Image (cartoon, rainbow, N blue to C red):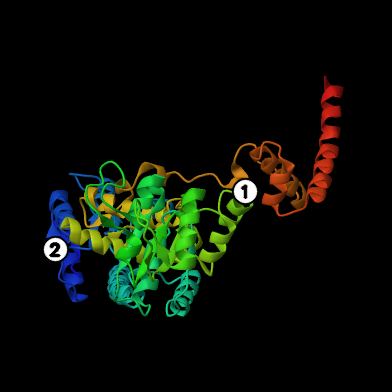
Amino acid sequence: MRPCILDDDPVRLGELLAAIVKMGYEPFLASESKEALELVRLRRCRVVIVAVHIPEVDGYEFLDQALDADPEVHVILMAGKYTLESALGAIRRGAWDFLPVPVDFTRLSKALHEVTALYDRLHRVKAIEEQLLTDLDFQGIIAKSPVMMEVFDLVRKVAPHYTNVLLVGATGTGKELVAKAIHQISPVGGQKLAVCNCAAMVDTLLESQLFGHVRGAFTGAIETRIGLFEYANGGTIFLDEVGETSLAMQSKLLRVIQNREIQRVGSPGVRQVDVRVIAATNRDLRADVLAKTFREDLFYRLNSIQIRIPPLAERVEDIPMLTRFFLKKYNKAYGKNISGLTRRAQLVLLRHPWPGNVRELENLISSACITATGDFIDTIDLPPHLLHRRDSPLEVAGWKQLTLKEMGLLHIERVLDMCNGSRTQSARILGIGRTTLHRYIRRMRQAAAPARKSKRAIA
């Protein structure tokens, strides 16, 4: 590590040079701030020792400029007038240390050795992280959190057995990656894996995509084509967003899973297929079954084994490794050489709730790699909405404390509104009997009565 000395006093410059060489370092000398800033931008020096009062630029201004050029640089300020307040102010502003003039070389030596030790640790940590990226790679999925370790264990147990699997999780959590992992380590891993997004197509097109069609079956069917079930025969088919399919399509899927046979659109013939089905959804299929929008028999067929993929907010410890993985990926894609994120940028990522999960993080790193001009991604390279912390539920206007009983009654009221007042349908969704629901409604009316009386009294 080569420090840089910025000072316009030739006597002090010579004293500092002799002392720092004696400490075992080979420093750069700069009499102008432009020289020092250029060294910082080129990352040729990681420490700058600068006098606060130099004619060309104030030391504090240089500190700001140096941190803008490289947020990871360490600046040691020197001042003839030393006070505790000025030292604390400089450190809050981003300085590594604040030394009085004449310089205490013992203290300067300690500061330089601390920075050297810090960079040694950072280099070791970077090497360990690179190794971890390899060690923690589970079939293309990067994670080290306990909740994801449980998912990986379940995948390893399920994969060897030829059974249907239902993957449940929010959008962007990586359900397709888990499906691919199950296929790859299964006995049919060498066979084909077909992927179908059920939410992206209307029923007629989805039926043709899954089961195929014969020539002349419909307008535009100029040739006979096989469907994904036939294409993946002997392997695996992944049905993404299966909860978005219609009841008519669900009945056709049920027939394939039960009888292991498909019928091409426009063909009277039946064809046998042997395909493992992995389905995924971001919906609550149990609630959809109760609401009669998803077939109960199909749900139980698909739900032989259910694997829940946790959202990124439940595994924030994975964010640093995922960030490094995506950084490596997009450095290669865009021809960049970005070393990482600054500490303040890392803090922003850890505080974000990640509603878009891993997909949102990947898109963020991808765009930041494009816009970043330095060796590190800083807060200026992040989207503006990430820099403003969202209010917690306790701070949202209109929020009030509720007992568990009150919360239950509020939920029942919302379900009744959703079902347009239908008590039979509401009871199914809530998983209770009609008599129990009537009792809850009576309690709700009794709780609402005092509030109405008090309003009339005020009026």
Give the quarter of the figure containing the C terminus: top right
Q: Which mark is residue 28?
A: 2
- Residue 302, percent across and down? 51, 64
**Is residue 417 visible in the rendered structure shown here?**
yes
Q: Which mark is residue 21?
A: none
Q: Residues within 10 Å of mark 2 (few under 14, many from 20)?
A: some
Q: Nearer the viewer, residue 60 or 424?
A: 424
Q: Which mark is residue 291?
A: 1
- Residue 28, percent across and down? 13, 63
| Element type at mark 2 | strand
Q: In terms of image quadrants, where is residue 268?
A: bottom left
Asked whether the residues under the numbered discs 1 and 2 touch, taking CB atoms below 8 Å apart as contact, a structural biologist would say: no
Q: In terms of image quadrants, where is residue 400?
A: top right
Q: Is residue 228 left or right of residue 240?
A: left
Q: Is residue 228 left or right of residue 296?
A: left
**Is residue 6 visible in the rendered structure shown here?**
no
| Element type at mark 1 | loop
The disc labelled 2 sits on which kind of residue? Phe
Q: Nearer the viewer, residue 168 or 27?
A: 168
Q: Is residue 201 above or below residue 164?
A: above
Q: Is residue 429 above or below residue 324?
A: above
Q: Residues within 10 Å of mark 1 (few under 14, many from 20)?
A: some
Q: CA distance from mark 1 to mark 2?
A: 73 Å
The disc labelled 1 sits on which kind of residue? Ala
- Residue 211, percent across and down? 36, 57
Give the quarter of the figure containing the N terminus: bottom left
Q: Earlier in the sequence, mark 1 or mark 2?
A: 2
Which residue is outermost to the front? 268
Q: Residue at x 54, y 44 (%)?
A: 391
